[in-house]
Image: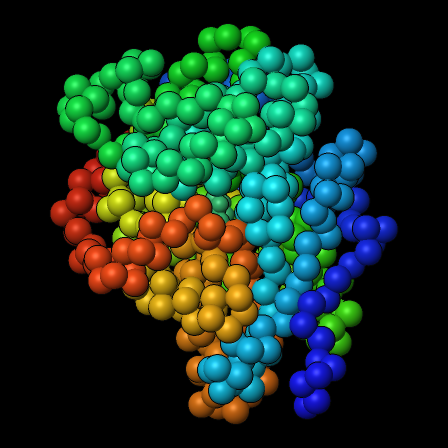
Amino acid sequence: MDESVRQHKILLDESEMPTAWYNIVPDLPEPPPPALHPGTLEPAGPEDFAPLFPMDLILQEVSQERYIDIPGAVLDVYRQWRPSPLFRAHRLEQALDTPAHIYYKYEGVSPAGSHKPNTAVPQAYYNKLAGVKKLTTETGAGQWGTALAFACALFDLECEVWQVGASYDQKPYRRLMIEAFGGVVHRSPSELTAAGRSYLAQNPNHPGSLGIAISEAVEVAAPDPEIRYALGSVLNHVLMHQTIIGEEALLQLDKAGERSPDLIVGCTGGGSNFAGLAFPFLREKLAGNMSPTIRAVEPASCPSLTRGTYAYDFGDSAGMTPLMKMHTLGHDFVPDPIHAGGLRYHGMSPLISHIYELGLMEAISVPQSECFAAGLQFARTEGIVPAPEPTHALAATVQEALRAKETGEETVILTALCGHGHFDLASYDAYLNGRMVDEAFDEDRLAEGLSTIPAVPGR
Ligand SMILES: *Cc1c(COP(=O)(O)O)cnc(C)c1O
């Protein structure tokens, strides 16, 4: 190939940007199990979610429509960085000496540096429409807090963020970025909520967890009609907002002359960037138009899909949310403080869990040092320092590209590079200077976590 003319980035014009989100639910062979009210154990109705979310988002959560139009005001914000580029990783392919074609959809071009604004912007928009004054939320690595603070600034909402303690301590620049957008940040667990105080009583230096931070944000939002809560992953409407990633990638791969990918691979914390990329391709697969393997990659330290139980559990640690059927390590499970903070969630999105149970996708787990090795190889060939989370997808991409080298197949791999790592350099410091360890997965802690899953007879 003439290296001087090969195509690196496949771009769409603003006018080609998709104008609807894709809802996979009506296309599935079986409907996903409903969320349950934790008191009655009956299916939760819209009124059970009303203390937390505005009605437009609740209706999206349970929608049976295949497509939902993206409001004009949201499209207008999206156009600041969308359509996002699709890159062909020629130099990584060369370094791996693989016949595979590797493509990555890069979401780090957003103002927050990740895919999270794809849902933060519509969530802020619908809350503003409903007359809400303030949004509360949790953040793990700080990416979601940054995205929501950005979106709240655009729609003139207050934003209050509980940041997981370990990440608050390690990542001062994420906190400062949230504050730059006008958000208020608390270290979680905090003294501000009953849930936070109970965890601090157990351990004054508690490292926190996403589940605990969610409990705090929910506790503040639920009783006050002017305050609502926003979740950055896991829920159906969040996954749906992210499908613009995959819809664009479908158009871009086609432009690149690739009829269909062989493998779609993404990292999964709560599952939103993975679903955003994969669901439009799964629609095409279910329709018989292509047949890619769809593979989720999770950290070996927090393996909800590969080691969790498929059961009804709480979305937060204190047990305040409706019960959701999902792959869970138990709502009290506190994973090791690995560097991919965005992947440290005890559960997996109910929709992804259901699709996994239906056998429509597969999952693997990878230890973090293998992920950082792949992340650095990517940085040194493609020039982008990835966030620690998508290095999991890159590690799996490298695994597949090396398999293709053995078989000689021109496998087409598509992955989501869902964020850059410019605020995560402390984790690269740990890796580069020999301070990163792959903790053996603590089976006792898993057993303890699984024992906190509530009993839900008959389901
Ligand atoms: C939040 C985040 C994740 C994990 O969340 P998902 O919902 O699984 O996508 C992964 N990568 C980045 C960059 C994130 O900000």
Q: Position of residue 123 (x, y in %)?
A: 62, 29
Report the colour scheme.
rainbow
Q: Position of residue 63 (x, y in %)?
A: 67, 35
Query: Please, is residue 22 above or below residue 267 in the view?
Result: above
Residue 255 can be seen in this image: yes
Residue 60 figure quarter: top right
Query: Please, is residue 430 above or below residue 216 in the view?
Result: below
Residue 31 figure quarter: top right
Q: Position of residue 381 (x, y in %)?
A: 51, 73
Closest to the observer, 32 or 190: 190
Q: Is residue 25 left or right of residue 370?
A: right
Q: Is residue 8 left or right of residue 75?
A: left
User: Which quadrant of the rendered structure holds the C terminus?
Assistant: top left
Residue displayed at 55% across by 46% down: 113
Q: Position of residue 82 (x, y in %)?
A: 72, 49
Residue displayed at 16% across by 26% down: 203
Q: Looking at the image, how many numbered discs can be counted on the residues?
A: 0
Residue 100 figure quarter: bottom right
Residue displayed at 59% across by 31% down: 150
Q: Is residue 13 left or right of residue 448?
A: right
User: Which quadrant of the rendered structure holds the N terminus?
Assistant: bottom right
Residue 327 can be seen in this image: no
Closest to the observer, 360 or 270: 270
